[in-house]
Image (cartoon, rainbow, N blue to C red):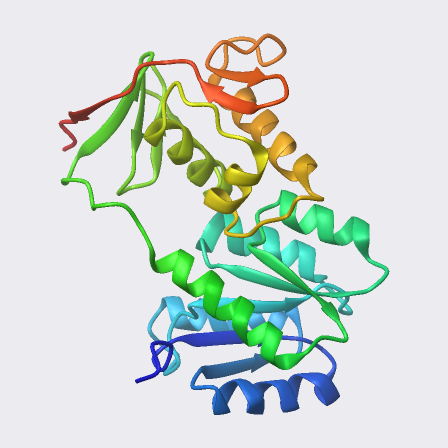
Amino acid sequence: MNDFASQTVLLVDDEAALREPLADYLVRQGFAVVQASSAAEARTHLRDAGKGASAAGVPDLVLLDIMMPGEDGLSLCRHLVEAKDIPVILLTARGEATDRIVGLEIGADDYVVKPFEPRELVARIRSVLRRASRSPAAPAENEVFAFEGWQLDPLKRRLIAPDGAVVAISSVEFRLLMAFVEHPRQVLDRDRLLDMVQGREAHLFDRAVDNQVSRLRRKIEVDSRSPQLIQTVWGGGYMLAADVRRMMLDIP
């Protein structure tokens, strides 16, 4: 049985000559595929799916071309990561190294360089879907991770400051903070963080982790230039320098 038979891929690419044969190939590999020729069309599908107005439903993964007329793939990727928490694989041209780095920094799960081998792309898709479905034991309702006055609610994906205020965090920042609270006082190197947060091994993109850590520090540190909670371990990576406990939160 194909483990991915019920998985839907939203394929967003303005090049019909690439998009349509690729969609046919993915269907033959057992995926359901929805095509969009632009970011605007993709947003329309996502909006309809969210309202239950689309038979295809919310996609399990988005395969997204970076270079498109109108809104580009990076802008749509940012929206998907921050608002939808849908895994994204970018399709990039060979010379777009900067765009690939930016894509990883804003939370894309992987990228594939054009021209690509379709079998490799399918392997990447399956790998990202497996990691997206793999999760630790579900916490009890209203159970939160508490550290230094902060509370992270894994079910509602909500970060609560010591003063009780809800602090907005992106999906990438949430996954990064989850990695730290699940491994407190452990040094997590960049490769491991990339694999845990973005679901890929990207040894050339340490900068992506550094930028994500910097953004998270600005949310939770008193002084992000002199961090006390997420500490840099030179030559090793990063560590959450706090004790973490699970507790029940009374939420009306």
* Foreground of the two, 206 or 216: 206
Picture quarter with the N terminus: bottom left
* Foreground of the two, 22 or 75: 22
Residue 226, placed above or below residue 210: above
- Is residue 43 at least partly visible in the picture? no
- Is residue 97 at least partly visible in the picture? yes
* Residue 71 x %, y %: 71, 62
Residue drawn at point x = 51 percent, y = 39 percent = 192
Residue 118, placed above or below residue 209: below
Residue drawn at point x = 57 percent, y = 28 percent = 213
* Residue 50 x %, y %: 38, 66
* Foreground of the two, 236 or 113: 236
* Foreground of the two, 2 or 100: 2
* Residue 51 x %, y %: 35, 69
Residue drawn at point x = 47 percent, y = 64 percent = 127
Q: Residue furthest right?
A: 95
Picture quarter with the C terminus: top left
